[in-house]
Amino acid sequence: MVLGLLGVLGFWIAYKNVDIPNPNEEFLTQTTRVYYDGGKSEIGQFAVQKRDSIAYDDMPQTMKDAVVAAENQSFWTDNGIDPKGILRAAFSNAQGNAQQGASTITQQYVKILYLTQERTWKRKAKEAILSLKIKNQLSKQEILEGYLNTIYFGRGAYGIQAAAQAYFDVDAKDLTLAQSATLAAVLNNPYSLDPANGEDAEARLLGRYQYVLDSMEDMGTAKASDVASVRKALPKFPKIKSDEQYGGQRGHVLTMVRKELLRLGFSEQEINGGGLKITTTFTKKAMNAAKDGVKEERPEGFGKNLHVAVASVEPGTGAVRGIYAGQDYLESQLNWAVSGGQAGSTFKPFALAAGIQDGFELKDTFDGNSPYDLPGGGEVENQGDHSYGRVNMIKATQDSINTAYIDMTLAMDDGPQKIIDTANKMGIPPEKAANPPYGFPTSTPALEPQTGVSLGSQTVSPINMANGYATLANRGVAADAYIIEKVVDRDGEVRYSHKVTDHRAIPEGVSDDVGYALQQVVQQGSGTKALALGRPAAGKTGTATNGKGEVSSAWFAGYTPQLATAVMYVRGKGNEQLKDWLPSYFGGSYPAATWTNVMLKALEGEPVEDLPPPAYVKGDAPSEGHAPIVPKPTKKPKPKPSKTSDAPSSSAPTETPSETPTTKDPGPPTDTPTDPTGDPTSSTPPILGGKPTKSPRGRRRRHAA
C-alpha cells in the first residue's frame, strides 16, 4: 500500500510539473547532416523543415475523416490513451524489436511534438502523462488540429499544408477525397508508401489507400458512391520539382543513406528532424572519379536512353567509396548502381572459384568448341560461333570462352548450385534476400541453379559485383558492403557505429589462381584496354543477352589491391538491345575504357602494388578427361654444313627468321576475326535445368583430347 501511495504521489507530481507547450513555438526540428568519409565535408542534408500551420476550419473535412479512419477510428470517443498499447510497445522496444508506434492520435501527437525517439520506460511514462493532460485540457478538435499540423507525411513535409503541396501541388483546403485518403494512407510509412519510390511502393500505397476509403465508408464519413468512383486507382501525382540540393549524384547518395538508416531502425522523424550527424563511407575523390570517368568515356549522342553505372568498393572492409548512378537525380531517381543488370561473363570468376574448390586446376582443359551440345537438348555458342579446341581455364577466362565454362559446370557434381554458393560467400546476395542482408540490393533476381549460371543471365547490382571482386582483391576474404560508418545524435551520443563483418569465402590459393586468370584478361585477353591503368590489375569483361537474343548489357569489373570497381552499360529500361545501337557493345570497349579512367582518377597518388602470383592449387578433379595438354617435345633440326670459302662474301647478310612461340592452347584461325573486347553470353535456346544429367555424348566431348 505504501508503494502504491508513493506511485500515485509520484504520478500526481509529474502531472502537475509537466506543462503543455505551444506547438507553434515549441515544435522545432534540427537538420540532419550527411558527411563524406571522415565526417568533415558535407554531402547534403535531410528535411530542412517544411511546415505551414493552418486553422482547423481551413482543413478539408475529407482530410480529417480520412486520418481518423486510417489512424484512430475511436478518436472522437476514446480517452486518448491506450494503456495496453503502451505496455505492448514498451515491452517490444525494450526487447530490441522493431519500434512500435503510438496507438491513438493523441499519443502520436505527443510523441512527435514533445518527445525524443529514445526507447525507454521513462519516455513511455512521460508520453502517458502528457497524453492524459492534453486529453483533459484540450478539445478533440484542438488535438486533431495540432496533429494535422505536425505529423510527418514524407518528402520533408510536416503537416497537411506542406504535404498537399509536396504530393499534389495544391493547398490543403483544395484536397479531394482521393487525395485526402492518399495522404492519410502515406502516414503509415511515409517512405515505403511514397509512389515516387517505385512501382512496389505505389502498389503498397494503393492497398493502404483502399483500406482508408473502405474504413471511411464503414464509419459513414464517406458515401459509398463517392468511394466507388475513386477506389480503383490512386489519384494522379503531378511532377514536383525536386530540391536543388539533390542535383547530380547527391540525390542518389542521400536516398541510399536514407534507406539504410531506415533499415538500421531509425525513424523518418529522426532522419528528417532529429539533428543527426551521419558519416558515410563515400569519399569525394572516388565519387568525382566515377562521375568524371563516365563523362569522359561515355559516347555522345545517346541521351537519356544510355545508362552508365559505376561502383567502387574497398577490399577488406566492404566500404562503398564511390558510385555513379546514371543520370542526374533531378532527371531520374533510378539508381543503376543499385538496380543493376544482367551480369554476363563478369560472373565467370565465381564459377572458376567454384571449379577450383571442387578439385579442378587452372591448367585442366575443357571443350572450347562451338557450338556445344547440351545434355537433354539445346546448345551454347561462343562469340562468333568460334571454336578454340581444348583449352585450359586460363585461356577460357582470358578469351571468355563460353563453351569451356559450360563444360566445366557440367563436369562438376551439382555444378550450378556450387557456383551459386561460392558467389554468395564472395558477396553476391542470393536470389531471395538473406537475413541479415549483406548487399545493395539485398537479392540477386534470377540467380538460379541453371547450367548456364556462369554466363550471367541473373541481375546483379554493380555495388554487389564490385564487392564480389573485392573478395578476390582481398585474397579470398569477403566483407559485407556498407555505406554508413557512424551516426551521432543531437546530444553527441553515438547511436550507430559500423563494425566490419568479414569471413573467409574461398581459400587464399583459390583466390590467387582466379586472380591470375583475370590478370591475363587484362594482359592479353578481352580486357586489354585496362592496360592503360599502368599498374597491376585483374578484371573481366561481360556482355549479356536477354530472352530475345538481344545484347542487354555490357560490363567490365576488376580490381587492384586497393580498390575494386564495376562498370555497367545498359539501355532504356535496362534490358534493351545494345548491338547496332552503340558503336561497340562489348564489355572490353566502353565499359573497360570507363573502368580504366575511373580507376586512374580514384587511385591517383596511391602506391603501385603488385597482385599475387598463381598458386596453382592442386586438386582431385571431380570427373575424368580434363588433364592438361602436354606439348610434344620438338626436335631441333641439325644444322647443315656450310660451304667455306677463303674469299670474303660480297652478298648481303641473310635474314634470321623470328622465333615462333609454342603455345599450349590452339588460338583462333587467322582467317577468323575475333573481337578483342569480350563476348556476349549467348545461349540458343536458353540454358535450363538445375542438376544437369551427363549424357554419353557430353562425356565423350569432355574426354576429347
Image: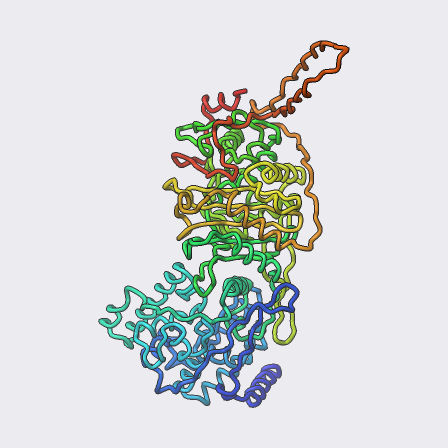
Q: Residue at x 62, y 29 (%)?
A: 363
Where residue 48 sits: x, y (%)? 51, 76
Residue sitting at x 42%, y 57%: 304
Q: Nearer the viewer, residue 587 or 105?
A: 587
Residue nearer the viewer, 178 or 397: 397
Marks counted in the figure total 0
- Could you tell me which residue is drawn at 37 percent across and 81 percent down? 77
Q: In terms of image quadrants, where is residue 187? A: bottom left
Farthest residue in the right direction?
646
In the picture, the quarter occupied by the C terminus is top right
- State the image coordinates of residue 559 (x, y, percent, origin top left): 61, 47
Judge whether 77 appears above or below 620 on screen: below
User: As displayed, is residue 655 above or below residue 332?
Assistant: above
Point out residue 270 in the picture as x, y percentages from the top left corner.
Answer: 54, 72
Where is residue 351? Give x, y as percent. 55, 38
Q: Quadrant of the N terminus?
A: bottom right
- The answer to whether residue 158 of the structure is visible from this angle is yes
Residue extending farthest left: 225
